């Protein structure tokens, strides 16, 4: 006699054990791979940064020697009389660094320096890592315990990260002058990663195993009890054939009891499987939206690439980020952000096929995997459908929000043959889309070159600030009634040693993105105050204005630093004017208001720049401690037109009623000057008066220009022609 329910329980229990093993293996695989990839990337970046520092400081002394021995054999290099001197110099340079080992190669693969003196002169031109670095790429790998490189001694009881890094001077297109190989002992860090992963996996497996073991023991006990009762009833039946009906009844009763136990255990097994599924969902799915997580997306992308290699198919990866039109979105809490993300995810899902994957990759970031993508045209078609789906506004609690999207596309195998490369290049294409204001951009090789040039320019900007390559040009401001010069505006320029004079549009945004805007602003302030003091000593007293970035008004230390610069220069605070745009204030109004109030209490003049081009909030204008507004030049150039003239008159009257003075920037003709004067504007600035010029030229202009000469002579009844 068989009891099917008990057999089903055993089957469910075995299924639970298999599920535990699969989930545990998946947790271990995804967790360790993610942690190890991030660790290797971070360590490789550290090696590249160290070599970059070495190339800037130590390589100029090493390069001539490397160039002179590039054609020599390994033995000639080892016996060269300057080899020992080079070794002493570099060893002293490495003193105090956490580098385990370092080697320097000539372009033909000969070691000219090694912390292991016996390796000097060895020829390693065939090493894969060296060849990759000589080609211009960074090559890294982990060397496990007991592994041996050709021609090297065994590295025992250590796990080493070795990186081959090319040395270039002059940017990414410059030739490789040498290769540096660095070794770092990463065993302690890897042991920490492994220990954390092992504890997590053992904890999950342990808890689930205890539950499964308990269920299995209960099922086994029930089976043994049933078997014992069945055998007992059989014996009774053989001994008392006449009592068959009674035995059958008892068997049925026992069967019902065991079926009840079976149903209870079945519920427990299902509950256990539900808990396993919930744990899996926490790992593989983003909780706020229910969409696949980055870990699951990466795993599916890896499987799709493997399948594409096997079948010769293509895979498209779309990386996107949604902005918002709500000026107060920086103050949103996670509940609102997640609410918007759920709506965005639903619209994206509706634009895709069932076989495609949409994952949430960040607070407002999403990624779409198009399996069997077909070609570039299909990927662009799908991206267009997604962008169109996100055009209608979203309703988030009590707000209506637009969420414009920027999408970057990378396609396997055209743009990369591994998941990491596809993710990187799709993200790079998205960055290009954000910068260009385009909805969709497909990756192109020149984007990598543009990024490399950007990194090179960023490094040069950092040193340019230190070397005072950034200079200030000055543009005068004139009183529209008296024609007197009432102030100047300091405009930064970069006197680049190779590219010549660069305007701020080429480097200000990069400075804001890299954190260099703070030292750049302080440098311009210091330069402008020093020049203001020089003019004051020459009897030319006027205000000097400096523009502030949005990033500066988020730094609570900035007012104290301005106070230090004023104290060091000796310039009265009233001679300094700081110009900020409306959008800078609206980005984070409470903090900006606090910093502006502190600056105003110091006696510094404050001005709203580009007024009318941003939010133009009258409420904030009344609350701000400002003395001046500068009307945006987009309104000034059309001053002679009726529509713009009405706007200008209203703006000027409003400012005067609030006790503010008005500056018009972008004055480029006599007609615009006359119109502004008739409208009651206070001050003018623009090419009609003077272009921005270096301080020495402005000093001459202040003494010799037709404006100044005629005014001093008392003959200034109208502007000069």
Image (cartoon, rainbow, N blue to C red):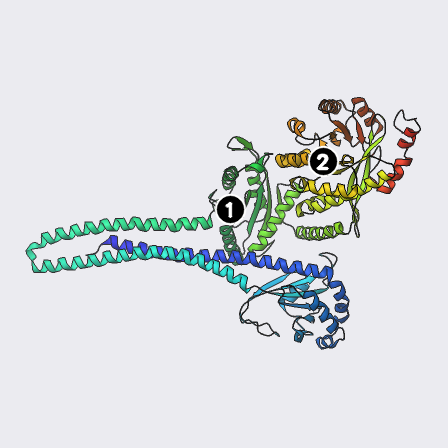
Q: Quadrant of the N terminus?
A: bottom left
Quick one: label 2, few (<14), some, or many (20+) residues within 10 Å? some
Element carrying mark 2: loop
- Give whichever of 302, 590 is nearer the camera: 590
Q: Name the residue under label 1.
A: 359
Instruction: Count the labels in the image.
Output: 2
The mark nearer the N terminus, 1 or 2, is 1
> In the rendering, at what x and y percent does residue 140 appear?
60, 63
Secondary structure of residue under mark 1: strand
Residue 168 in view (yes/no): no
Q: In this view, does 680 lie to the left or right of 243?
A: right
Which residue does the numbered mark 2 point to in the structure image?
602
x, y percentage for residue 408? 60, 46
Front-most of 592 and 473?
A: 592
Check the picture and name the quadrant holding the C terminus: top right
Which label was assigned to residue 288? none
On the image, the x and y values in percent for residue 432 come to 65, 46
């Amino acid at each position: 006699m068989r009891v099917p329910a008990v057999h089903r329980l055993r089957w469910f229990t075995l299924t639970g054990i298999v599920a535990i093993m699969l989930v545990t293996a998946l947790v271990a695989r995804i967790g360790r791979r993610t942690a190890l990839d991030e660790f290797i990337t971070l360590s490789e970046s550290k090696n590249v940064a160290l070599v970059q520092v070495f190339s800037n400081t130590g390589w100029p002394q090493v390069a001539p020697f490397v160039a002179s021995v590039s054609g020599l054999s390994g033995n000639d290099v080892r016996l060269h009389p300057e080899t020992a001197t080079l070794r002493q110099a570099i060893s002293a340079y490495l003193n105090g660094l956490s580098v385990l080992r370092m080697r320097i190669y000539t372009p033909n693969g000969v070691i000219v320096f090694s912390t292991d003196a016996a390796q000097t002169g060895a020829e390693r031109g065939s090493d894969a890592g060296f060849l990759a670095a000589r080609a211009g790429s960074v090559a890294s790998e982990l060397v496990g315990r007991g592994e041996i490189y050709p021609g090297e001694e065994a590295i025992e009881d250590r796990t080493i990260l070795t990186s081959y890094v090319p040395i270039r001077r002059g940017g990414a297109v410059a030739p490789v002058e040498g290769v540096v190989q660095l070794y770092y002992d990463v065993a302690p860090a890897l042991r920490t990663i492994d220990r954390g992963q092992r504890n997590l996996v053992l904890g999950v497996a342990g808890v689930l195993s205890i539950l499964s073991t308990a269920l299995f023991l209960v099922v086994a006990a029930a089976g043994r009890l049933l078997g014992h009762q069945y055998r007992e009833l059989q014996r009774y039946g053989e001994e008392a054939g006449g009592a068959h009906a009674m035995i059958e009844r008892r068997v049925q009763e026992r069967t019902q009891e065991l079926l009840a136990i079976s149903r209870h255990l079945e519920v427990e097994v299902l509950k256990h499987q539900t808990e396993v599924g919930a744990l899996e969902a926490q790992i593989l799915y983003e909780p706020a939206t229910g969409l696949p997580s980055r870990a699951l997306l990466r795993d599916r992308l890896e499987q799709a690439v493997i399948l594409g290699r096997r079948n010769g198919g293509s895979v498209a990866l779309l990386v996107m980020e949604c902005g918002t039109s709500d000026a107060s979105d920086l103050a949103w809490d996670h509940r609102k952000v997640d609410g918007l993300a759920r709506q965005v995810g639903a619209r994206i899902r509706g634009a895709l096929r069932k076989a495609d994957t949409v994952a949430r990759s960040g607070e407002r970031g999403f990624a779409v995997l198009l399996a069997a993508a077909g070609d570039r045209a299909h990927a662009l078609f799908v991206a267009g459908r997604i962008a169109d789906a996100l055009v209608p506004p979203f309703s988030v609690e009590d707000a209506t929000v637009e969420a414009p999207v920027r999408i970057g596309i990378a396609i396997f195998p055209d743009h990369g043959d591994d998941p990491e490369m596809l993710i990187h290049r799709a993200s790079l294409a998205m960055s290009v889309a954000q910068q260009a204001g385009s909805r969709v951009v497909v990756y192109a090789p020149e984007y990598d070159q543009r990024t490399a040039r950007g990194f090179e320019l960023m490094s040069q900007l950092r040193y340019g600030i230190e070397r005072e390559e950034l200079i200030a040009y000055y543009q005068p401001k004139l009183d529209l009634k008296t024609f007197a010069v009432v102030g100047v505006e300091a405009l930064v320029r970069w006197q680049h040693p190779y590219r010549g004079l660069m305007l701020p549009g080429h480097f200000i945004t990069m400075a804001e993105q890299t954190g260099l805007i703070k030292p750049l602003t302080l440098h311009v302030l210091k330069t402008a105050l020093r020049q203001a003091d020089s003019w004051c000593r020459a009897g030319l007293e006027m205000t000097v204005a400096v523009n502030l970035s949005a990033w500066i008004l988020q730094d609570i230390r900035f007012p104290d630093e301005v106070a230090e610069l004023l104290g060091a220069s000796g310039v009265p605070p009233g001679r300094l004017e700081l110009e900020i745009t409306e959008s800078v204030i609206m980005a984070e109004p409470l903090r900006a208001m606090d910093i502006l109030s502190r600056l105003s209490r110091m006696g510094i003049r404050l001005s709203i720049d580009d007024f009318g081009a941003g939010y133009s909030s009258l409420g904030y204008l009344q609350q701000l401690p400002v003395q001046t507004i500068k009307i945006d030049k987009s309104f000034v150039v059309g001053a002679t037109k009726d529509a713009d003239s009405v706007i200008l008159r209203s703006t000027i009257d409003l400012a005067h009623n609030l006790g503010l003075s008005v500056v018009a920037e972008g004055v480029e003709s006599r007609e615009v000057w006359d119109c502004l004067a008739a409208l009651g504007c206070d001050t003018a600035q623009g090419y009609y008066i003077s272009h921005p010029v270096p301080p020495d030229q402005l000093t001459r202009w202040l003494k010799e220009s037709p404006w100044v000469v005629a005014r001093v002579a008392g003959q200034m009844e109208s502007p000069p022609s």
